[in-house]
Image: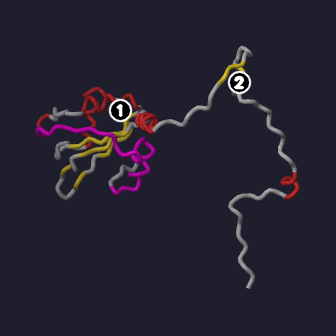
Amino acid sequence: APAPSRVPLVETVSSESARRKPPPLPSTNASTSATSMDTAGSSRAHSPTPPPSPREITALVESMQTTVMMRNLPFDLTRDHLMQCIHDEGFFGNVDFLYLPFDFKSASSAGYAFVNLTSHSAALAFRRHFSRFGRWGARGGRVCNVSWARLDQQGLSANLARYRNSSVMHNSV
């Protein structure tokens, strides 16, 4: 039986182009460094940009986070009450997603929520404001803890994709 043909992972070069010599590289000596022309027409030496450090990558990722997780919420808190509280505390118009899991058997919330804010700066202000927040009214003395949501749960589109098929998701989503 003939051997099955394999599809190459890399496109091969034709034999004619393989015989052509590449153009010669400009000659350099040890005292010459890489230069480029600036907008004024003068040349200046430059070096290649090093790759970002792990600390720089972490800072970049953190600077784009907009989704937080609120923990230790009162169990009798409803989504409407939480949204009203968020608005009353000065974040009206800054929230584009709120998910407060609710247990219909016990008629109570799960005690945590995911909130996506419209910008990273709004999310930072939200974290500062609601960390150690406890003014829930008659809903008990629980003190809120706010942290960043996981990276795969950051942003409005990630949250919509995650909860779109949930049995309790609102029809408008």
- Residue 96 at what x, y percent from top left? 38, 37
Residue that mark 2 sits on: 36
SS for dot 2:
strand
User: Residue lying farthest top?
Assistant: 40
Task: Choose between 54 and 127: the one closer to the eye.
Answer: 54
Q: Is residue 22 above or below residue 167?
A: above
Q: Is residue 104 above or below residue 69?
A: below
- Which amino acid, mark 2? Ser
Please state the extent of the stretch shown in magenta in the rendering. Answer: 139-167
- Residue 38 at what x, y percent from top left? 69, 19
Residue 173, can we see it? no
User: Residue lying farthest front?
Assistant: 30
The residue carrying pointer 1 sits among few (fewer than 14), some (14 to 19) or many (20 or more) residues within 10 Å by Cα, namely: many
- Residue 167 at what x, y percent from top left? 34, 57
- Which amino acid, mark 1? Ala
The residue at the point 19 percent across, 43 percent down is 72
In-image side of 36 versus 166 (left or right): right
Task: Choose between 75 and 61: the one closer to the eye.
Answer: 61
The residue at the point 11 percent across, 40 percent down is 140
Q: Is residue 165 magenta?
A: yes
Q: CA distance from mark 1 to mark 2?
A: 41 Å
Q: Is residue 140 magenta?
A: yes
Determine which quarter of the picture holds residue 125.
top left
Residue 112, can we see it? yes
The residue at the point 40 percent across, 32 percent down is 120
- Residue 47 at what x, y percent from top left? 62, 28
Residue that mark 1 sits on: 123
> Which of labels 1 and 2 is toward the front?
2
